[in-house]
Image (tube, rainbow, N blue to C red):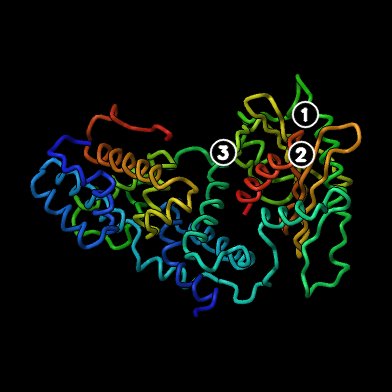
Amino acid sequence: MPTFQKSLEACLPDLWRYAYSLSFDKAQADDLVQDCAERALRKRQLWDPSRPLKPWLMTILLNIHRNTRRRSTFLRLVPVDDAPATTAPATTEARMELADTARAIQMLPPEQRDALLLVVIGGLSYKEAAETLDIPTGTLMSRIGRARRNLRHMTAAEPISSFDGKSK
Amino acid sequence: MTSGQIDPDITEDMLHAYVDGQLSAEDEARVEDYLAENPEEADLVANWQIQNQRLDALFPRSEAADRVARLDIPQDLPNRYRPALPLALTAALCLGLGSAGGWFAHDSVAPPAAMAPTALQSLDLRARQAHLVYAPEVLHPVEVAATDEAHLVAWLSNRLGAPLSAPDLSAVGFVLMGGRLLPAGEDAAAQLMYQDASGERVTVFLTAGAPGVLANFRFSDPAEGTSVASISWEDDRFRYAVVGALPRDDLMTVATELYRQFL
């Protein structure tokens, strides 16, 4: 059976991707993951070994992120040049599309963004993501549904009036 | 949802699960058959797939591996015993301990001297005193209101010397009103005040924690002549007390939620 430390380290790349997708800032993602790993190691007794480790780590990461997010409430818009992609897409068009998506994801209501990215970037199952967010799976699904509809409208230049920011 | 010929067995959730690769092979085949006959849904699903691909490209896996390789993940953090709060509290309450002098988690390796209860006892007392003074206040219950939460949190974090957040207790029916800075001996303490729909108030009282403290919990029944009960605990960041004129179970629900958010 892998040690706690090994299991934790195996989760780090996904945690980092998720942290980066939340913060859009690589240094901040480093700090988030570092902080999360340290807390997890200190509090490893709180983890129930019969359950998967990653959702538990994601919960810690999200808590840290939300606490910092609450302190900087203004919206950060990332200039096209700083858009995260490091493997530069071949065409200008593809680069613009990625920058569009980057902007759109940041404009989503946080609860929709958290839900969608936990699944798509964090690599969690729906059940694990719902546990991480402490919401019923049905609520998770409706947040993912709204996130996808909003992304679709924002990236396809469709009318913003259909933007769906309801909280449930 | 767009219109289309609805196969009653194919739900929107299934379409999402299809896009996210969370369906069994059998269900995947069913969704594909369905999409072949419902072009509008197929367009939608294609858009979601493109969204997923772009998100994946925005946050490349290869870079994640490089970045975490450069992090300095400690190999040997002390494995501090800290039972989950609800469990420890339930144990303490079931045993009928707590109201007398508090219940302290055991750590077989720590010397008994490290379990001195004084810090938590005095925190508990100060938290109750502060609650009795400020919770009934009509005009000035808080010094900085929740409308100015960013400022409140930054200010109190600064004075307590540790990053603090105001937990969101809406899940247990309480809304943040604001907070104030208070003395705790010669140190700074923060009091956060919450109110439920009926106007009942609970306060959360925090002081800076001490590195290396052991798990400690106590439940204090209302003192003579008051109706205010409290639950307090500590870790290496803060000492926490939650105070309110609530039944034990209700106060414990609030404490559990606080504990979860301070994880």
Please determine whether, in this image, residue A80 is positioned above or below residue A32: above
Residue in the picture at 8% in, 46% down: B37
Q: Residues within 10 Å of mark 1 (few under 14, many from 20)?
A: many
Chain letter for mark 2, please. B
Q: Answer whether labels 2 and 1 touch (C-beta < 8 Å).
A: yes
Could you tell which of marks 2 and 1 lies nearer the N-terminus?
1
State which mark lies toward you, 2 or 1. 2
Specify the farthest residue to the left.
B37
Specify the farthest residue to the bottom.
A1
Indicate left or right for B172 with B210 as reference.
Answer: left
State which mark lies toward you, 1 or 3. 3
Q: Which structural element holds mark 2?
A: strand
Give percent across and percent down for residue A150. 30, 38
Per the image, the residue denoted by label 2 is B243
Q: Toward the viewer: A97 or B126?
A: B126
Give percent across and percent down for residue B240. 74, 48
Per the image, the residue denoted by label 1 is B135
Disc 2 marks a residue whose amino acid type is: Val
Residue in the picture at 76% in, 42% down: B205
Could you tell which of marks 1 and 3 lies nearer the N-terminus?
1
Q: Which structural element holds mark 3?
A: helix
Per the image, the residue denoted by label 3 is B171
Give the quadrant of the N terminus of chain B: top left
Q: Residues within 10 Å of mark 2 (few under 14, many from 20)?
A: many
Residues indicated by labels 3 and 2 sit on the same polypeptide chain: yes
Alpha carbon separation for disc pair 3 and 2: 18 Å
Q: Toward the viewer: A120 or A161?
A: A120
Chain letter for mark 3, please. B
